[in-house]
Image (cartoon, rainbow, N blue to C red):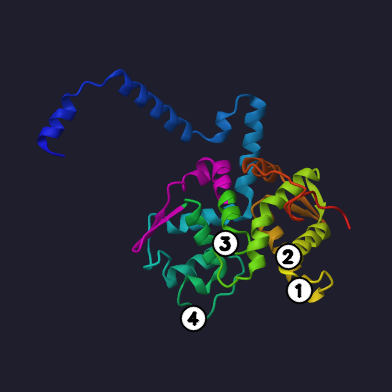
């Protein structure tokens, strides 16, 4: 800015519109800086939001994402692709302690797929910021402790958009992995319409029916069915990892967080759609 421009800016008298805009921006900033529970209108609503926040913070996936952010701290050197360097990738894998086997030789973060998944997820959700030289805490990192429900929603919607199966992973490229990923929001809708619970076998059957119909498989193809069922179970595990569903024996139950997510992403049930997206899973 030139000296003349600075002088003009300092001598300019704010008008009414400037004052109103400043007040509006301040109000928006205050709302964004307020935990969701504090925005609720009644004590009952606040208590419910606080419980949801506690549930969100307790989800295993959120604990790992918090560990990723804590590990990065004030910053870690990055590769040109914005990933952790090999030594830091190994250290993070040990810190996350997921049971992932660490190879004798780790050349890059990609050699640790579970750790790479959580690192990429944290970045995509806004908990990390990456450049070609450094990884630092992202704009939403503070929400993990300050507003766990908001942080959880960011993590959950990011994962659904990126894919429960294929998102942030290397190697899974079959078309029906993408198909099942796209059907995940519909699975939540189906559970909502089934009063929040369905037999796992029914979810598996409908996942297989969806893939078989779209890929032209015979429903009696047991070899391919076993592969698809394994993927469906991986989807359910990913949902449970984030606290969206829970396994109760042979039943999949939608949690309070899962119900919130289902409505937040405006899922609609359409009986004309494919088997997982439309209609509630039914018992076999």
Q: Quadrant of residue 82?
A: bottom left
Q: Nearer the viewer, mark 3 or mark 1?
A: 1
Q: Which residue occupies the foreground of this view, 247 or 186?
A: 186
Task: Tell me the crowding category of disc 1: few under 14, some 14 to 19, or many 20 or more residues within 10 angstroms, Cα based.
Answer: some
CA distance for labels 2 and 1:
10 Å
Say what secondary structure mark 2 lies in: helix
Q: Nearer the viewer, mark 2 or mark 1?
A: 2
Q: Which residue is mark 4?
A: 105
Which residue is drawn at the image coordinates 43% and 66% (left, top)?
84
Stretch in magenta: 128-155
CA distance for labels 3 and 1:
22 Å
Say what secondary structure mark 4 lies in: loop
In the rendered image, residue 268, in percent from the top left (x then y), is placed at: 70, 43
CA distance for labels 4 and 1:
34 Å
In the rendered image, residue 250, in percent from the top left (x then y), is placed at: 83, 58
Q: Nearer the viewer, mark 4 or mark 1?
A: 1
Q: Are marks 2 and 1 in contact (CB under 8 Å)?
A: yes
Which residue is drawn at the image coordinates 63% and 24% (left, top)?
42
Q: Which mark is residue 211?
A: 2
The vertical placement of 271 against 71, above or below, is above
CA distance for labels 4 and 3:
25 Å
Horizontally, residue 60 falls left or right of residue 83, namely right
Q: Earlier in the sequence, mark 4 or mark 2?
A: 4
Q: Which residue is mark 3?
A: 167
């Amino acid at each position: 800015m030139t000296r003349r421009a600075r002088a003009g800016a300092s001598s300019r008298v704010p008008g009414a519109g400037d004052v109103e805009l400043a007040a509006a921006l301040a109000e928006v900033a205050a709302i964004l800086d307020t935990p969701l529970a504090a925005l609720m209108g009644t004590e009952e609503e606040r208590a419910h939001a606080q419980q949801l926040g506690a549930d969100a913070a307790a989800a295993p996936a959120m604990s790992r994402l918090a560990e990723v952010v804590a590990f990065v701290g004030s910053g870690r050197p990055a590769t040109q692709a914005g990933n952790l360097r090999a030594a830091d990738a190994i250290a993070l894998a040990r810190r996350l302690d997921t049971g992932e086997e660490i190879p004798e030789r780790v050349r890059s973060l990609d050699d640790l797929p579970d750790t790479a998944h959580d690192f990429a997820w944290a970045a995509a959700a806004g908990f990390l910021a990456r450049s070609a030289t450094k990884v630092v805490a992202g704009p939403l990192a503070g929400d993990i402790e300050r507003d766990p429900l908001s942080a959880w929603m960011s993590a959950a919607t990011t994962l659904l958009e990126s894919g429960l199966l294929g998102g942030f992973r290397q190697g899974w490229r079959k078309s029906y992995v993408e198909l099942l990923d796209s059907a995940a929001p519909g699975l939540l809708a189906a559970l909502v319409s089934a009063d929040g619970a369905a037999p796992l076998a029914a979810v598996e059957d409908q996942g297989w029916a969806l893939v078989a119909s779209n890929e032209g498989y015979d429903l009696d193809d047991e070899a391919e069915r076993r592969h698809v069922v394994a993927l469906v179970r991986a989807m359910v595990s990913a949902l449970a990892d984030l606290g969206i569903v829970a396994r109760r024996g042979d039943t999949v139950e939608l949690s309070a967080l899962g119900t919130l997510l289902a409505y937040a992403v405006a899922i609609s049930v359409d009986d004309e759609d494919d088997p997982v997206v439309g209609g509630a899973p039914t018992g076999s």
